[in-house]
Image (cartoon, rainbow, N blue to C red):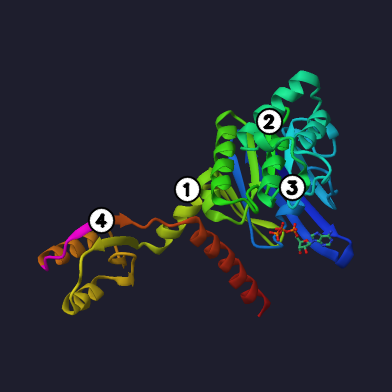
Amino acid sequence: MTLAVETKSLTKIYPKGKVHALKALDLKVPQGCAFGLLGPNGAGKSTLVKTLLSIISPTSGHGWLLGQDISNKEARRNVGYLPEGHRFPNYLTGRGVCRYFGRLSGLEGAELEKEIDEKLELVGMKEWGDTKIVRYSKGMNQRVGLAQAMLGKPKLVILDEPTDGVDPVGRHQIREVILNLRKAGTTVLMNSHLLLEVEQICDQIAIMHHGKVLQQGSTDDIRNAVSVDKGSVVVAFECGEISDELDTKLDKLGEREKGVQGFDITLPDRDGIDKVVDLLRKNKVSIYAIKPRTANLEQAFIDVISAQEDQQVGGSR
Ligand code: ATP
């Protein structure tokens, strides 16, 4: 497996307050994937990104970007970066920002202008390209940030909270841009607290907590581990009115919660679905839809973090 990012025992202790932000962290990001870095506030995600990009130096351990040691500035030649909470100079226009960062990537003249047009168009900012940053909303700033990160056709793009402050339409647009990057073979490494978004974009994820990677793997495997562990199935039944008598009978089949239309039921196994259908039809209740409620990343994330916290509490007793 060719790796776009690798770390071995990467450690960062901030001297001020002696905060252990990264604790011998091992990470492997395969080339060509969209990789989501998840973790609660303070898990060390931004510290990891900044260490990989040599914005800060590690206390110990090793890291590689596209096969090159992070201490070598050549390692960053093919990397695009959108920092968290970036501030571009207010007197520049969006196009001016792109021009500045494009030149840093080695682009010049007509080639640079053509790429800027392309990238501003992709993020829906072409018409605003000649407007000064001071007039941009947070979401517009973020879109220009994404455009500059893609200049020079980097092989790896690192995005720290790419949709922070962006409205739903803009988020959809940014999601499409990231998916297209991946389709074109670019590796994307992104941090986000929006788990639904990570689920829609990333095929690989790592869950970080207290400076360590607790779990790493394909999004499907991590998400599915939740329902497999519990051995039960959760099904949403959309149906007509239910009598009190039927209500009592259904309670015997599984644990229920009120759904938007009908109910969600947790059944001990798949056979339970037939039993619910039989019971409803016998009682002349119309069934509009039956949908399996698959485990979501949010539940998997909470399970992984809670298990770690419980372990720590247990260990400190
Ligand atoms: P968030 O999701 O809130 O952005 P994060 O996962 O990106 O959090 P980091 O910003 O990397 O986490 O912070 C990891 C730990 O390091 C936190 O405890 C934070 O307080 C601490 N930290 C971050 N930057 C510094 C610094 N410059 N000096 C001292 N401690 C720092």
Relative vertical location of residue 309 with respect to residue 59 in this rendering, above or below: below
In the rendered structure, are the residues bearing label 4 and label 1 in contact, judged by CB atoms less than 8 Å apart? no
Residue count near mark 1 (Cα–Cα under 10 Å), binned few <14, some 14–19, many ≥20: some
Residue 33 screen position, x and y as percent: 58, 37
Residue 25: x and y in percent read 72, 52
Look at discs 1 and 2 and give the one toward the viewer.
Answer: 2
Say which residue appears at 82% left-offset and 33% top-offset.
Answer: 100
Name the residue type under label 3.
Arg
Outermost residue toward the right in this view: 15
Q: Which mark is residue 220?
A: 1
Q: Amino acid at mark 2?
A: Lys
Residue 116 in the magenta stretch? The answer is no
Residue on which the image places disc 3:
135
Residue 2 seen anywhere in this rendered image of the structure: no
Q: Residues within 10 Å of mark 4 (few under 14, many from 20)?
A: few
Q: Which residues are magenta?
A: 283-289
* Residue at the spot of label 4: 289
Mark yes or no: residue 89 visible. Answer: yes
Q: Earlier in the sequence, mark 1 or mark 3?
A: 3
Q: Earlier in the sequence, mark 1 or mark 2?
A: 2
| Residue 288 in magenta stretch | yes
Along the polypeptide, which appears first: circle 2 or circle 3?
3
Q: Based on the displayed image, in which of its 4 quarters is residue 18 positioned?
A: bottom right
Please determine whether, in this image, residue 265 is positioned above or below residue 1.
Answer: below
Left or right side of 252 for 300? right
| CA gap, disc 1 and disc 2 | 25 Å
**Residue ID for mark 2:** 155
Eye-nearest disc, 1 or 3: 3
